[in-house]
Amino acid sequence: MEKDRAPFSQEGERPVCAVCPSLLLPGGAFDVVAKPSRDCPFDPVSGNRYTAAGVPVCVHPERVGLPPAPYATDHLVLPWEAPPPGDAGEVREWLRAALTAAPPDAFAGVIAQASQILRASDPNLDVTAALRSALG
Ligand SMILES: [Zn+2]
């Protein structure tokens, strides 16, 4: 299985739903909604919920770490895939949002991008301390 197509779920890292599309699908291949509703009825055969268009839905955003959004339906960019801001002042917020949502194998790339922007903004900056404070 290719790395970028790995299931999104981080079992052992996060208490994902017992049955959840994130266990089988990579981020972006399912939608996330705030709570179960008639818009995404439960399918007893698979145990998942689906939109009317058949897109799998996770109903526990706090468990998968992704804010509710129609990622698959609208082909949205995932938080950790969004390009980082060029402004160092906004990097901390971007970093926090990206790392909250990112699967572990995306962490290194996110941190590298943030480090680069912070270092470019101030060559004397203690990047490690800045990253820690952003995540603190
Ligand atoms: Zn879920």
Image (cartoon, rainbow, N blue to C red):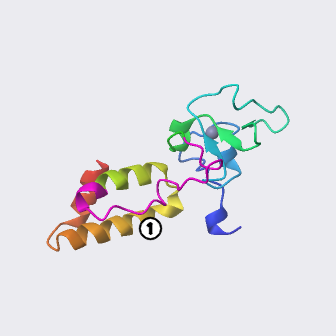
Highlighted range, magenta:
69-91
Residue designated by label 1: 109
- Badge 1: few (under 14), some or many (20 or more) residues near its Cα, within 10 Å? few
Residue 19, placed above or below residue 134: above
Queried whether the magenta region covers residue 116, the answer comes back as no
**Residue depicted at x 37% and y 68%:** 113
Who is closer to the viewer here, 119 or 41? Answer: 41
Residue for point 45% across, 61% down? 107
In the picture as drawn, the residue positioned furthest to the top comes out as 38
Q: Is residue 2 left or right of residue 114?
A: right
Image location (x, y in percent) of residue 49: 73, 35
Image coordinates of residue 96 in percent, x first then y, are: 36, 51
Q: Secondary structure at mark 1?
A: helix
Magenta stretch, overall SS: loop
For this view, does 116 lie left or right of residue 103? left
Q: Where in the figure is residue 57, as x and y percent of width and height?
A: 67, 40
Residue sitting at x 74%, y 29%: 41
Q: Residue at x 81, y 39 (%)?
A: 46
Report the image quarter containing ligand 1. Answer: top right
Q: In the drawing, does residue 42 fall left or right of residue 105? A: right
Residue type at numbered disc 1: Gly
